[in-house]
Image (cartoon, rainbow, N blue to C red):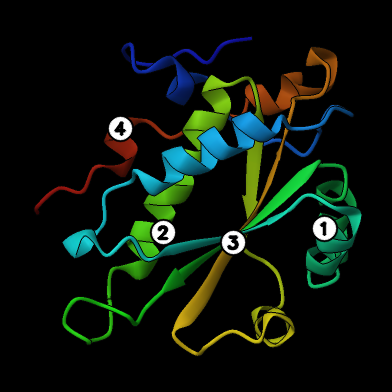
Amino acid sequence: MERVLEQNIMEEIAQRYSTIYFADAPVDERDLQGILLAATQAPSAYNEQPWRFFVAKTPQDKEMLLEYMMPSEREWMATAPVLILVAGNMGDTHNGLFNYWTAFDSGCAWGYLSLEAQSRGYVTHCIGSFDRVDLRNEFQLAENLELYGIVALGRPAAEAVTRKEKQMPRKSVNAVQLRRR
């Protein structure tokens, strides 16, 4: 089932959806590198490219990320063959000051990652509900690195399983467009 949109847009955007159902199939390493490459091509303020990614492919790395998630999300995230922690570096800037745009830019990189995955026949779902403090300690991260989301990546489950997800309504352009009073 395809979404009905007000006008034609890029197919990857029109068909993208967040799934909790993944097929039991690996992510090809070449595809994974291409998906990450696409993320690095996102625009960023002052070209700081603040995004950072931790890719969990092994059972041990995935389990390390899963233990910091809420139980309801841990259950379905565990079925994805790859998990990607998205972080942003708020320091290490061109002028040595705090990078206010890190979250915005890292979010854009996640968007590019998601669209490239879609174009290669994969699906994604990003969550933000995980224990950032304990995960930061696990990684022994510097304070200037902020953790934003964990992306599940894999092939989609069978159409019969994902049909309802693909039909989830989206707000219209008019519903989200701010207007001056």
Rounded to the nearest whole Å, what is the CA distance between mark 4 and mark 3? 26 Å
Q: Where on the picture, by quarter, is residue 166?
A: top right
User: Is the N terminus in the top left, top right, bottom left or bottom right quadrant?
Assistant: top right
Q: Nearer the viewer, residue 137 or 158?
A: 137
Q: Which residue is mark 3?
A: 149
For label 3, the crowd category at 10 Å Cα-Cα, with few meaning under 14, some 14 to 19 and many 20 or more, is: many
Outermost residue, front direction?
Answer: 30
Rounded to the nearest whole Å, what is the CA distance between mark 4 and mark 1? 37 Å
Which comes before the other along the chain, label 2 or label 3? 2
Residue 57 visible, this orientation? yes
Which comes before the other along the chain, label 1 or label 2? 1
Q: Nearer the viewer, mark 4 or mark 1?
A: 1
For label 2, the crowd category at 10 Å Cα-Cα, with few meaning under 14, some 14 to 19 and many 20 or more, is: many
Q: Nearer the viewer, mark 4 or mark 2?
A: 2
Which comes before the other along the chain, label 4 or label 3? 3
Q: In percent of the image, x 44 and y 85: which residue is there?
A: 144
Give the answer, above or below, for where 107 lies relative to 20. Answer: below
Residues at circles 4 and 2 in contact by the CB criterion of under 8 Å:
no
Q: Where on the picture, by quarter, is residue 20?
A: top right
Q: Where on the picture, by quarter, is residue 177?
A: top left
User: Is the C terminus in the top left, top right, bottom left or bottom right quadrant?
Assistant: bottom left
Q: Which residue is mark 1?
A: 62
Rounded to the nearest whole Å, what is the CA distance between mark 4 and mark 2? 24 Å
Rounded to the nearest whole Å, what is the CA distance between mark 3 and mark 1? 14 Å
Which comes before the other along the chain, label 4 or label 2? 2
Rounded to the nearest whole Å, what is the CA distance between mark 2 and mark 3? 10 Å
